[in-house]
Image (spheres, rainbow, N blue to C red):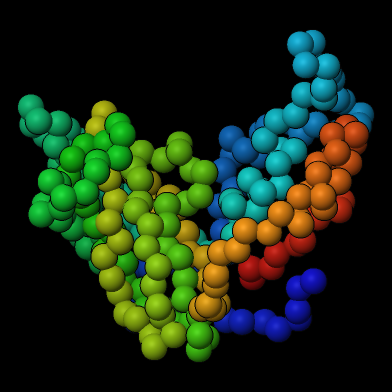
């Protein structure tokens, strides 16, 4: 059961007119997801081999929740990306009317694994926003969840922002074969606030029966069991 307390993630832009607002992630649901036709009781079909109802990603509410969780920082200027040398390194350039969007970090090329399919250079989004969470809250800053259609991969980090944190470098890698324009308005970082709490892991076999009961009920329902019986609506405004 969700409580009715409303927490606020505050941000500031130094009144820079080039910067857009930080908006709820639900406003950045990609067009390819919207175009997928959902499966419901009026149009379902059975898989010929398994004899169970065929479903697609529109049937997965955890997937949808990931797209809509938290808030999104979008790119505030166009960036042109070109492969510049025989090693596959990229050359980036942008207009001069905005805060500088990208920096380069070279020392980590030999220290951390390079994401598959990416150029070895580590770039940084030079985020010009200031953030503040309520006391006792942090946020996960990560690549827009499940957005593998984007030509870059933003790395993940947890930011303790309840003391107010201004600006910062959010590292990312570019797809090694990408050339083109990353357009202004492209989502580059997803921010998901969470409360700082102590946790412990515990093995508890007693939960198996409840899990098995729900699993069987879901298997005996063609569609929508999770949404109807387990899913809780989240609110990020």
- Please tell me whether residue 73 is drawn above or below residue 58 in the rendered image: below
Q: Position of residue 25 (x, y in %)?
A: 56, 59
Q: Using the rendered image of the protein, determine whether residue 147 is visible from the camera's viewpoint.
A: yes
Quadrant of the rendering where the C terminus is positioned: bottom right
Instruction: Name the residue at 41% across, 80% down.
Output: 161
Residue closest to the far top? 48
Residue 121's image quarter?
A: top left
Instruction: Name the residue at 26% across, 65% down.
Output: 169
Residue 221's image quarter?
A: top right
**Apparent side of residue 40 relative to residue 145 in the rendered image (left or right):** right
Residues 9 and 55: in front is 55
Quadrant of the rendering where the N terminus is positioned: bottom right
Q: Position of residue 197 (x, y in %)?
A: 54, 78
Q: Position of residue 14 (x, y in %)?
A: 34, 81
- Please tell me whether residue 195 is drawn above or below residue 52 in the rendered image: below
Q: Using the rendered image of the protein, determine whether residue 13 is visible from the camera's viewpoint.
A: no
Residues 150 and 234: in front is 234
Instruction: Name the residue at 89% across, 41% down.
Output: 217
Q: Position of residue 68 (x, y in %)?
A: 61, 56
Numbered circles on residues, count: 0
**Apparent side of residue 39 relative to residue 9 in the rendered image (left or right):** right
Instruction: Name the residue at 59% across, 39% down.
Output: 31
Residue 84's image quarter?
A: top left
**Apparent side of residue 58 relative to residue 226 in the rendered image (left or right):** left
């Amino acid at each position: 059961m969700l409580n009715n307390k409303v927490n606020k993630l505050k941000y500031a832009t130094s009144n820079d007119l080039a910067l857009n607002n930080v908006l709820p992630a639900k406003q950045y649901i990609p067009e390819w997801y919207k175009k997928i036709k959902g499966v419901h009781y009026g149009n379902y079909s059975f898989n010929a081999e398994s004899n169970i109802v065929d479903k697609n990603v529109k049937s997965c509410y955890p997937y949808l929740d990931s797209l809509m969780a938290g808030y999104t920082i979008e790119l505030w200027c166009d960036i042109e990306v070109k492969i510049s040398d025989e090693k596959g390194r990229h050359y980036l350039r942008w207009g001069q009317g905005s805060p500088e969007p990208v920096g380069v970090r070279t020392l980590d090329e030999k220290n951390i694994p390079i994401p598959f399919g990416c150029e070895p250079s580590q770039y940084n989004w030079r985020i010009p926003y200031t953030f503040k969470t309520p006391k006792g809250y942090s946020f996960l800053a990560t690549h827009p969840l499940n957005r593998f259609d984007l030509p870059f991969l933003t790395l993940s980090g947890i930011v303790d922002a309840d003391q107010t944190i201004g600006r910062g470098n959010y590292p990312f890698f570019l797809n090694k074969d990408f050339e083109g324009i990353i357009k202004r308005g492209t989502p580059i970082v997803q921010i998901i606030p969470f409360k700082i709490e102590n946790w412990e892991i515990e093995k508890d076999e007693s939960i198996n029966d409840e899990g098995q009961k729900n699993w069987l009920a879901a298997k005996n329902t063609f569609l929508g069991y999770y949404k109807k019986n387990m899913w809780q609506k989240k609110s990020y405004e």
